[in-house]
Image (spheres, grey):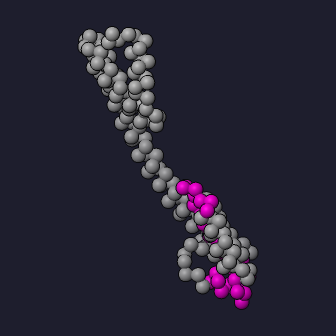
Amino acid sequence: MRLWCVDASCNHFESTATELQELARRTRKPQTIDLWVATKIDATVGGSGANSVHERSDSQWVKCSALTGEGIDDLRQNLSERLKQHDSEEIGSVVGTAARCSQSLHQAITAIQQAIQLTTDQEGHEFVSAELRLVAQCLGEVTGTVYTDDILDRVFGRFCIGK
């Protein structure tokens, strides 16, 4: 969360706001939340900055005064709403990722059990190899890396299976 505060009582409110918005755009990271705050609105009577901040039609600016307390509740509410929205988006992402990982791990467990059963039943090594390849693929989905051929070459190379 980044709060960008601009003195609404200054004569250069509009140019300062534009400059900071460009800086915000250039430095924004994917999960960044920017909140724009026009400060010192109690001191904007008659100044050119006052006209700029009061004429703005966009709702991205929260107008407040630390001196009088005006707008502070709006600022708190805006902060809270933006963080709740951000948290709910993050939770949705985490839940989806956890579900995918869980499914991959269950598939890996099933494949391991199948490989053990195939070995116990003395089935062909190519069947065991296929199950182990599936295990490696499922675990690779969880970790973000897949080394199925490398792993299988090492496993079967050590045991001279298939020769």
Coordinates of residue 22 in the picture (x, y in percent): 62, 68
Q: For the C terminus, which image quadrant?
A: top left
Q: Is residue 108 left or right of residue 59?
A: left
- Is 96 on the left-hand or right-hand side of 12? left
* Residue 50 appears left or right of 132: right
Q: Nearer the viewer, residue 22 or 88?
A: 22
Can residue 3 be seen here?
yes
Q: For the N terminus, which image quadrant?
A: bottom right
In this rendering, is residue 54 above or below 5?
below
Q: Residue at x 43, y 41 (%)?
A: 98
Where 17 falls versus 118 (above or below)? below
**Residue 124 location, x and y as percent?**
26, 14
Seen from the viewer's position, the closer of residues 3 and 30 is 30
The image quarter containing residue 19 is bottom right
Which segment did they paint magenta? Answer: 26-54
Residue farthest along the front direction in this orientation? 163
Image quadrant assignment for residue 107: top left
